[in-house]
Structure formats: C-alpha cells, structure tokens
Amino acid sequence: MPPIQKTVLTNGISVITEEMPGVESCSIGIWVNAGSRNETRAINGVSHFIEHLLFKGTKKRTALDISREIESVGGVLNAFTGREYTCFFAKILNKDLPRAADLLSDIFMNSKFDAKEMEKEKSVILQEIKMVEDTPDDLIHDLYAERFWQGHPLGWSILGPTETIKSMNRERVLEYFKEKYAPHSVFITAAGGLKHKKVLTLLKPLFGKLKKAATPEAATTPASEPGVQLIKKDLEQVHMCMGVPMPPQSHPDRYKVYLINTILGSGMSSRLFQEVREKRGLAYSVYTYLNLCKDAGTLVAYAGCNDAKFAEVSGLIMKEFERLGKDVKESELKNAKEQLKGGMLLGLETSENRMMKLARDEMYFGKPVTVKEIVRDIDKVTLKDLRKFASGFLSPEKLTVVAMGKVNPKKLPAGLKGLA
C-alpha cells in the first residue's frame, strides 16, 4: 500500500494519512478551510476567537480536563489560525492516537461556547492584540499585509481589531461556526506510526455524524496596492517591509518563487543578509519570506535598522530586487536548489511537519505532492527561466513599502519617492 492514502467520508470530510514506519509518534490535525479572509468587517477576528473557545470546555470535559488529557501522556495539543485556514492538532505517541482523536472530535463538535468563558477569553485576546502592537517587528507584517491587499479581507488582521473583539457576542460566533465549520470545509490529516484503516476505524464514528452542508460561495480575488506608507512612531528602530506581487501557491512557477526567496533573503548566505548585515553592518535582522495564498501571493523583505540608515537600507533592498533578474549565477542557483531541497527533507523528518504538508497539499493542490516530484521540479528550473521570471516580477513600479518608526519622507531613496 502507498504511504499516503485518502478516504472521503459520506458527509464529505476527507481523511488523509501518511504512514512513517519506525516512528514512535503520530500527529493528527483537524483542518478548516476558513480563516480571516472568510470574515466580514463586523466579525473580523472571529476565526481566531473560535480557535481559543474550542479549548474552553465541552459537555463532558472542562478546560482543565482538555489540557490535562494530552499533557498527561507527554503529548502536545495546540491550534492556530491563518488567513485561509484554521487547524486544531495533537502530537502523541502512537498508542495514544485514540485518546487524541476522541479529544479533538469532542472539542470540535461539542464545545459549549459558554458565555462567561467567552467574556474571559475576550480579555485574553485583547492582551494578545496589545502584545503584537507592542512588538513592532511583529506588527509591521500585519501593516504590510493591510496595505498590500488594501480593502480586501486577506489583508485584515487575524486577531481582529480591539473594538470588534469587544463587541463579539455568542450568537454571532455560533452563526459563523455553524456556517464555516461544516463538513464541506473540514478535512483531517494524520502522519506517523499509524495505519490508514485504523485511523478510519477511529474517525468514522466520531466525525461521520457531522451533517453534510451546502458548499459556500467562492472568495473574491484580491489585487495588490503598490506605493509607500510611512507610519511615524517613537521607536528605537525603523521597521520596514518591502514587497511585490507573486503568483499563488499552486502556480506552475512556484519553484522559481521559492528559489528567488532563497537567493534573496533566506539564511545567512543570502544576498540581503550578506549585503546589508555582513558587508555594511546596517541591520541585525534582514530577511525575505513568502506569503502565497490560494489566488494571490507576495514576496516580502523585512529589515529593522537605525532611522538614519533607513534610506540606505531600503535602497539596497531595492537594488537587490532589481539585480536578481540580471546577474544570478549558475553556482548561486545550484546552491539555492540544494538549500531548498535540504531544508525540505530535514523538515519532513517529524510526524507533525508531515501532517501539515498533507494539509497544505490538500488545500492548494487537492492531492499529495510527493517529495520526488518537488525535487524534480526544483531541479528543472534553469538559470534562464529564473532570470526571465525575476525580471518580470521584481520591478520597482510594483513595490509596496510600509515603514514604521522615526521615518522622514524627505529621506526616501530616489526609487521610492515617486511611489510615496
């Protein structure tokens, strides 16, 4: 039998597993194809709020019971909310998979959404919002997304605004939960020392009772908003994000995107790290990352620097963006390919990461993408392909720049003044 198997239950919930022989642990996650981009302004933050509330008690378990049940056998129980999905997962020893499956199904289907607990959890989330607002190197990424996808839910905060969280009521939360957490939006992935048939035997009685519901309308596709936004704030550093549009996660050119990100700003050997930090000592933290979604994407460069050096640092980042389509060397491309492949293979040694890869493949491709396929497609990218792609996407007129701190608009580099 193949290591990756998929079964669709009669109500539409997919169960996808990957067997990892010889591994003592397994990880199981319930995934919901709903995140902050599925919200309206009036309930922005509700997906993240629900993530918290599902740990606050069910008909047969208290909040303390929920946390103790997995921790008592050395396992991990957690959850996270993204812009396009929400996940509730557990990592346990193989023998404790029935315990994890029962607990996850209970919190997912039988949470009480107690009004008193909701009020307490509001306070927790408000503190979480304040913590982000007090951490500028975290906050700047939310501000960038808001500007880049201006006016679209994909750019809204996952945590939601303070006033919206304060006004959230039980009726509104339950309405969203019933609509978005129905079988058409749910799938389950599991990986580790397990067997697909045994996983199905566990999950069918637990999740098969969920009733099938109508498929929701498709989300609207966002457009990027180029330009410069300067946010004055009394900080020791200027924190900045500079980015350009990229194809979505499932696009055939995605491996070129991964390689560009690796060359530009992934790791200490990257161009930006070497140019900005090692050669000039202008910033402690400088890197790039990708935010690739179902129908849109962006490549973002981040740097934190002294306000007097902001113009120089932003100018250097722009220069590296422009250079990439012209002077990537064969040796540089080869190193990036090996870095990308090695990082992927090392990351997939754990059951947790394998479980999450199964989920990403299901969300963005509707099928498993094997490691062999990924390695093949990375190796297929030629120097000519990469240069042509980079020259088309990394152009100055497509830039979105958000900077926060003691920023002086008069000291912008020449290439950005026309965008401000």
Image (cartoon, helix red, strand yellow):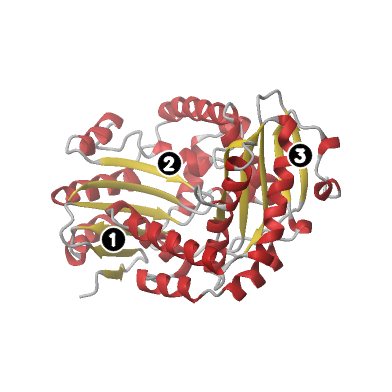
Q: Residue furthest front?
A: 279
Q: Is label 3 in a helix, a strand or a loop?
A: helix
- The amino acid type, in three-letter code, at marker 2 is Glu
Q: Nearer the viewer, mark 1 or mark 3?
A: 3
> Are the residues flagged by discs 2 and 3 in contact, CB closer than 8 Å?
no
| First in residue order: circle 1 vs circle 3 | 1
At x 24%, y 50%, the residue is 101
At x 21%, y 46%, the residue is 92
Q: Is residue 307 left or right of residue 202?
A: right
| First in residue order: circle 1 vs circle 2 | 2
Q: Quadrant of residue 323?
A: bottom right
Question: Residue 52 location, x and y as percent?
Answer: 42, 37
Q: Quadrant of residue 281?
A: top right
Mark 2, residues whose alpha carbon is within 10 Å: few (<14), some, or many (≥20)?
A: some
Q: Nearer the viewer, mark 2 or mark 3?
A: 3
Question: Residue 132 location, x and y as percent?
Answer: 55, 31
The residue that mark 1 highlights is 208
Question: Residue 103 location, x and y as percent?
Answer: 25, 44
The N terminus - image quarter: bottom left
Which of these two is toward me, 181 or 262? Answer: 262
- The amino acid type, in three-letter code, at marker 1 is Gly
The residue that mark 2 highlights is 51
Q: Nearer the viewer, mark 1 or mark 2?
A: 2
Mark 1–mark 2 Cα distance, whole angstroms, equals 22 Å
Q: Is residue 396 above or below residue 130?
A: below
Q: Is label 1 in a helix, a strand or a loop?
A: loop
Mark 1–mark 3 Cα distance, whole angstroms, equals 58 Å
The residue that mark 3 highlights is 311
Q: Can the viewer see residue 195?
A: yes
At x 36%, y 62%, the residue is 358
| First in residue order: circle 2 vs circle 3 | 2
